[in-house]
Image: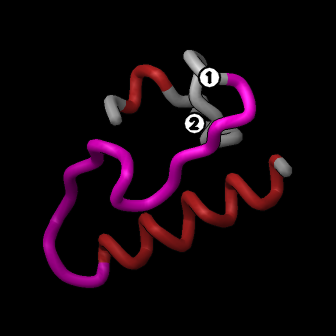
Amino acid sequence: MDTDHVSSKTMETRDVPGLYVIGETLDVTGHLGGFNLHWAFASGQACGVAL
């Protein structure tokens, strides 16, 4: 999913209220290595706090 359609604070989609996307379901690029795990945990934390 394109990040333009997702709130960066809550990870909730703007198109479908109540739908949250985290980790690899978002089109986020970064350095290879542990950064994908970091993104998965960070986006999950943001979503969990919002819920």
Q: How is the image coloured?
A: secondary structure
Residue depicted at x 29% and y 83%: 34
26 over 22 or under it: above or below: above
Give me the C-alpha separation between circle 1 and circle 2: 15 Å
Is 26 colored magenta in this rendering? yes
Snapshot quadrant of residue 24 = bottom left
Residue that extends furthest to the top in the rendered view of this protein: 15
**Of the two numbered discs 1 and 2 in the rendering, the one whose residue sits closer to the viewer:** 1
Label 2: how many residues lie within 10 Å, few (<14), some (14-19) or many (20+)?
few
11 over 31 or under it: above or below: above
Is 39 colored magenta in this rendering? no
20 over 45 or under it: above or below: above
On screen, residue 46 versus residue 21, left or right, reads right
On screen, residue 47 versus residue 30, left or right, reads right
The spot of residue 45 in percent (x, y) is: 68, 65
On screen, residue 16 versus residue 24, left or right, reads right
Q: Report the residue marked by disc 2.
A: 8
Q: Report the residue marked by disc 1.
A: 16
Q: Which amino acid, by three-letter code, is at mark 1?
A: Val
Q: Which residues are magenta?
A: 17-34
Label 1: how many residues lie within 10 Å, few (<14), some (14-19) or many (20+)?
few
